Image (spheres, helix red, strand yellow):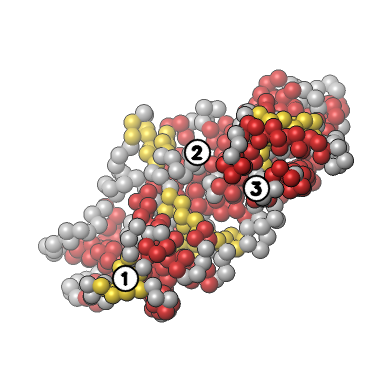
Amino acid sequence: MIEQDILKFMDDALSAEKSFSGYYTRDLLVLENPKDPAHGDIAANIAFRLAKPMKKAPNELAKQVSAALGARLVGSGLEGAIDAIEPINGFVNIRLSVKVLRGVLSQISDAGEKFGRSDTRKGDKVQVEFVSANPTGTLSVAHARQAAFGDTLASVLSAAGYEVTREYYINDEGVQITILGQSIYARYRESLGDEYAFPENGYKGEYVKEMAEEFRKEHGDKYKQDTPENLKVFSEWGCDYLLKEIKQELLDFGVKFDVWFSQKALGASGKIEKTLGALGDKGLLYESEGALWFKSTQFGDDKDRVVKKSDGAYTYVTPDIAYHKDKFERGFKKVIDILGPDHHGYINRIKAAVQALGYPADAVNIIIIQLATLYKDGQPVKMSTRAGEYITLREVLDEVGKDAARFFFLMRKASAHLDFDLELAKKQTQENPVFYVQYAHARICSIISASKRPEDRICKADVELLSAPEELNLFKELRQYPVAIRLSAHESDPYRIITYLQGLAACFHKFYEANKVITEDAELTNARLYLISCVRQVLANGLTLLGVSCPVKM
């Protein structure tokens, strides 16, 4: 890839530049797509990264970097690939030659489904833990957004070369599971015709009544007696029942986990006690007010954390610390936790624990996913028609389908609140973002089919015939796909893939409106068919990363 050659050229040039000695390092050099295509084909923000240590303005440094690169261009082997190196608004922008731009077609044709993928991070094991909802109810819209984000991020990281494991942490023991069992039991007694007080903090959703009825059909009045043993049966049965529902919902949403990790199994393994022992051996635990505390403030937390209460019970954070120790012991170089917006306080304590256990703070990346609001007919949808408490993933899937749901949940960065327009997601028009991208793919399939040209003939096309402005724009857009993957992986947010596909689809539609593909000139027709077949391939690659289908007809 030309980007790798340019990256090496820039690194060699800047490393040898005496004026940058002591300031420049390779990790400061990141290539990206210019925000304004008119500014070139590749941009580097190296001047902004050097500005503070060198105490110079980015604009001044960008001129200095551009001059240094320009002076070394001749003899670098890139003279025919780079047309210009220009400082623009503090960025160092590079314009590629038309020959290089056209070369992206052969790269796509040769790589096919693998175009955009990289093996530069081969061997780097990453674990992505996401959703991890308590099995005390079906999945909500908030969980749905986390599921779409986590699954797509895992796919992006895989495309960037990482060895990725998708993992779901099952909170299958503790207070909430006990309350679930009590709630089902109360509804079970009601279904038997008994008067029985419902627990004050119980789960009141309609789904609990349905579960109780299902339990009664299976077991009759066998577990009618109010005993600790029977309540444990309801807790375990309810947890298993809901976990099966959750797994099916996620499969229907296109999400499949590699590992389902049980908190109960973690507790039974003795790893929690071993973890506390390891912290104790390091002098990081102390007793106060009858409880056992972890000195998390030594590692940047805002306060020390109780790990064992005065009654001997562990706090919520204790199994989480042991779980993260287990993650690293399984060989993961980096772990990513994807959590909801009510978990901000979780960040410092887990990062503190990871450091206390001897791992770098940046070995764990905790991503907070903001909430999503569903809109229908311009109004926010507040209540679930089924559960009476929240809108479920199943309801969204039933309303708009998997493709639209996944695409729409990814249309904003994780840090931004998401407004999800249900009516827009169902429209079969180009107003609908997912339809717009899928329609570009289907339209290309239709054109290629109508051309009745064999694939091997299309691939031998003369690309030098492609010189229209819209064709050049497509070259530029196509070559940005690997960059979009690399930056999405670097930023741990697949949002760039969404915006990239929308941009590529727009670029294709503009090309199609301005140029005939099937013309009286057979060679030009072949060249344009070759071009759009490459567009189709990249659209398919990107949609597949998102877990969205690639229709051939619409």
- For the N terminus, the image quarter is top right
Give the residue number, with chain letter if any, for mark 3.
23
The residue type indicated by label 1 comes to Trp
Residue 495, percent from left and from top: 54, 41
Q: Residue 332 location in percent, x, y? A: 56, 65
Give the mark nearer the N terminus: 1 vs 2. Answer: 1
Which type of secondary structure does the marked residue at label 3 adopt?
loop
* Of callouts 3 and 2, the N-terminal one: 3
Marker count (numbered): 3
For label 1, the SS is strand
Q: Which mark is residue 438?
A: none
Cα separation between marks 1 and 3 = 42 Å
Q: Residue at x 87, y 32 (%)?
A: 462
**Residue sitting at 37 percent across and 52 percent down?**
344
Circle 2 residues within 10 Å: few <14, some 14–19, many ≥20: many
Camera-side residue of 91 and 369? 91
Distance CA(mark 1)–CA(mark 2): 42 Å
Number of the front mark, 3 or 2:
3
Which amino acid, by three-letter code, is at mark 2? Met
Q: Would residue 321 be found to the left or right of residue 334 on screen?
A: left
Which residue is labeled 1 in the image?
293
Inter-mark Cα distance, 3 to 2: 38 Å
Residue 384: name its quadrant.
Answer: top left
Q: Residue at point 59% right, 49% down?
A: 490
Q: Is residue 260 above or below residue 462?
A: below
Q: Which residue is mark 2?
A: 411
- Mark 1 or 3, which is nearer the eye? 3
Residue 452 lies, in percent from the top left, at 79, 33
Q: Give the image quarter of residue 515.
A: top right
Verify CB contact (< 8 Å) between mark 3 and mark 2: no
* Label 2 secondary element: loop
